[in-house]
Amino acid sequence: QVQLVESGGGLVQAGGSLRLSCAASGSIFSISDMGWYRQAPGNQRELVAVISSSGSTNFADSVKGRFTISRDNAKNTVHLQMNSLKPEDTALYYCNLRHRTGLFNYWGRGTQVTVSS
């Protein structure tokens, strides 16, 4: 069983920055794709950013140029650096670990990000 623990959320003013971290237990981190998703009240969960096991990245159009994603396989962690935050970035941010084949798929409990205008 894999556990994902997110941290780094909080309240920030528009234009500010936050760095989210996700720590994974177990031994499958290095072969997993890692993603950050978010869900605002009344909205569906949406992909924010993903980094594959090989290090390739993909971002939602709404965060391109503002967010970066990185991973540290030695520490089983993935980070989401969020800059130039906007009120519309306010959401519960979830960490996701999955294998590209769909063999396994795990979610964290989320960390709240609130951006004030």
Image: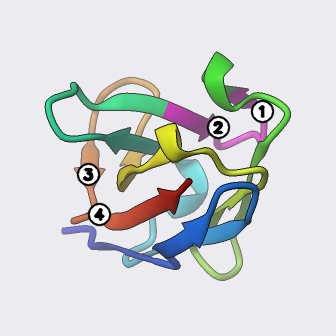
Give the residue displayed 35% in from the left and 68% down from the top: 111
Tag of residue 106: 3
When the figure is inspected, residue 25 is found, relative to residue 64, above or below; the finding is below
CA separation in Å, label 4 and label 1: 23 Å
Model colouring: rainbow
Earlier residue among tags 2 and 4: 2
CA separation in Å, label 2 and label 3: 15 Å
Q: Label 1, on which residue?
A: 56
Tag of residue 52: 2
Evaluate whether residue 34 shows in this view: no
Q: In terms of image quadrants, where is residue 103?
A: top left
Q: Nearer the viewer, mark 2 or mark 4?
A: 4
Helix or strand or loop: what does disc 4 sit on? loop
Which stretch did the figure color magenta? 48-58
CA separation in Å, label 1 and label 3: 20 Å
Query: In the rendering, at what x and y percent does residue 17 appear?
Result: 73, 66
Query: In the rendering, at what x and y percent does residue 59 appear?
Result: 67, 27
When the figure is inspected, residue 8 is found, relative to residue 72, above or below; the finding is below
Earlier residue among tags 4 and 1: 1
Q: Pick out the residue farthest to the right.
A: 65
CA separation in Å, label 3 and label 4: 12 Å
Task: Give the left or right position of residue 51, taking residue 48 as reference.
Answer: right
Give the residue displayed 58% in from the left and 71% down from the top: 12
Task: Give the left or right position of residue 70, taking residue 8 as reference.
Answer: right
Q: Label 4, on which residue?
A: 110
